[in-house]
Image (tube, helix red, strand yellow):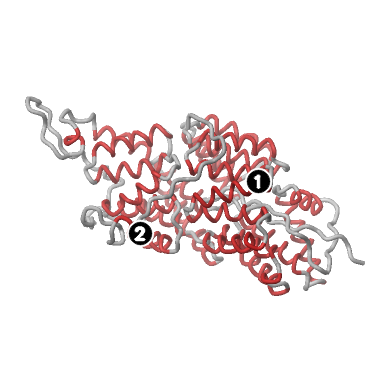
Amino acid sequence: MKTERVPQIVLGLGAGAVLAGAAALFVPGGLGDGGGAAPAPGAVARAVSAAHAGAQASLPELAALIGDREAWLRAHPGDDASWALLGTAYVERGARSGDTAAYVRAEKALERSLAVLPARKGNADAQLGMGALANARGDFRAARTFGEAVRARDPRRWQAHAVLVDAYSGLGDYVSAGRAMERLRALRAGAPALSRASLVYRYRGWREDASALAHDAVALAATPAEKAACLARLGDLAWERGEPAEALAAYGPALRLVPGHAPSLAGRARALAALGRTDEALRDYGAALEALPLPEYALEAGELYESLGLDGDAHTQYEMLRARATEAGTHGVNGALVLARYEADHGDPDRAVGRLRAEWARGHRSVHVADALGWALYRAGRAEDALPYARRATETGLRSALFAYHRGQIERELGQWGPARRHLTEALRVNPAFSPLLAPQARRALAALGEPPEGGPRDVYGGGAPRSGSSRTWSPPPRDERRSPSPGRPSRTASPGASPSGTAPAAVPSSPSPSPSPSPSAGR
C-alpha cells in the first residue's frame, strides 16, 4: 500500500571554517513519485518534524534517519527522493561529526537520485543536496551553480536562496549574498534565515545588527541542536568584538543544551584563553577536537601551546592539522585556506602563496582568502605585492582584528608608519586578545613605532627630515623577528603599484559596496 510521502532534509552544517557559513536545512517535496515509507515513530519522526521547521535534528536522530532510509532503499532502489534525502543527511553528518568520508557517500547517493530522476526533469531535491555538499566541501563555485539552477526553475524555493547565501559568501560576492539573504527572509521566517542574515550583516561590518539577529535566531530556534548552534554563533560574534565574558555567557547554555557541542567548546576555549585561563582553554580545545577534529581547531590549539612555550605540544597539534586536512582532501574537501594559514606562519610561506593563488584563480575571493594571501605574500618577503590583498580584506566591511593586524604589519614593512600605527591600534581596539601569539606582537610593534614624529605627514610616512630645531630623529622601527619573512629570504617586492600577478593593481578588484538593508541600526 502506498504510504504518505516523507519530506526530505538538507540540514544545517553549523559553524566551520568557515568559514564560511552553514548549509541550509531544507524540506524538499517528498520521497519520489512511487511514494516512500512512513517515518518510524521516535527519532526518525523527530528528525522529519525538525525538517518541517527548517531546524537541525540531533545527531542521534540524524543517525536514525540515515538508517531508516538505507533500509528502505535496499528494497526500493528506484526512489529518487529517498536517495536525495540520504545524501543530504550524509552531508550533515559529515559536517557535524568531522567524518569527511560521509561526503563521498553523500555524493554517491545524490548522483543515484539524479540518475533516477535527472535535474532537467525537476529533481531539485538532489540539486539542492549537491549544493549543500559543495558548500560543505568548500567548492563555492559549484554550490553557486546548483543553487542558481534551482532558483531559475523555482524562484520561490527558499532552500535555493539559503544555499546561495553560503556560496556567494564563500566566493566573496557579498552583494549577491545580501540579495539572496533578503529573498530568503521574504520567503522563510525562523532561525535558519536569521542566522544567515546575521552572517551577511557581519560581513558588512554591522556588528550590532548581526548580534541582534543572532539573538532573534536563538529565540526562534526550533530544536535543542539548532538553539545550540545559534548560541555558538552569538558567542562567536561577542568574542570577535573583544568581549570574551559575554561570549562565555552564550557558550555555556549551548553546552548545557548539547553537551560536547564542538563549535561551543572551541569558542569557549578562545574566550578562556583571552581571559588568561589557559589550562581550561586547552582542556576545551582537546574536547572540541575529540568531538569534531577540524584542522582549524588544531591550528588554534597549537598556537595557544606555542604562546605558552610548549613547542612540543604545539608541534603535535600542527601534525594533527596536516593529517586531518590531507585526509579530508581525499574526500573532496578544500583545505587550502587552513593549510595556507599554517604554512604562512609555521611552515613554508611560498607554498602558502601557491595554494592561495590557486584559490584566487578559482574565483574564491572572500575576505578570508584575500587576507590569507596578503599575509602569505608578506611572509614570503613580498610586502608590496601583499598590500592590495590586505586592503581588500580590511575595506570590504568585516571588522577583524586579525585582518587589521596583518595589514598593519605589511604597512610597517613598507615604511608606511602612519597607516601601520593606525591598523595595529585598530586590531587591539577591535579585540585586545585576538590571538595568543599575535596580540602581544601587535603591542610590541606599536611600542617600536612609538608616537608620531613631530615633522608632519612626511615624517609620519618616513619621507622627511626632522623639523628644524628639533633634536628628535626618525628611523625605521625594528621588524618583529618572529613574524618577519624567514631569515635569508630575499625580498621580492614588485615595482610600486604592481599587483601580485605582475599586472596593474586592478587585478585585485575592490569589493563592491554592499547593497542597503532595511532599517539597519545606528552606531556600528
Q: Nearer the viewer, residue 194 or 462?
A: 194
Residue 266 image position (x, y, % from top left) = 55, 43
Q: Quadrant of residue 250?
A: top right
Position of residue 238 relative to residue 335, above or below, is: above
Q: Point out the image quarter for the N terminus.
A: bottom right
- Circle nearer the viewer, 1 or 2: 1
Tell me which residue sits at (65%, 67%) in the image: 105
Q: Residues within 10 Å of mark 1 (few under 14, many from 20)?
A: few
- Residue that badge 2 annotates: 353
Q: Is residue 123 left or right of residue 473?
A: right
Q: Nearer the viewer, residue 521 or 218?
A: 521
Q: Residues within 10 Å of mark 2 (few under 14, many from 20)?
A: many
Q: Do we see residue 135 in this rendering?
A: yes
Amino acid under label 1? Ala
Calculate the distance from the C-alpha at mark 1 to the C-alpha at mark 2.
41 Å
Residue 444 image position (x, y, % from top left) = 29, 35
Q: Is residue 454 left or right of residue 257?
A: left
Q: Secondary structure at mark 1?
A: helix
Amino acid under label 2? Val
Q: Nearer the viewer, residue 421 or 510?
A: 510
Tell me which residue sits at (51%, 48%) in the image: 297
Q: Quadrant of residue 26?
A: bottom right
Please report whichever mark, 1 or 2, sits nearer to the chain's N-terminal start.
1
Q: Secondary structure at mark 2?
A: helix
- Residue that badge 1 annotates: 186
Q: Residue furthest left?
A: 469
Q: Do we see residue 102 in this rendering?
A: no
Residue 127 image position (x, y, % from top left) = 65, 64
Position of residue 269 relative to residue 341, above or below, is: above
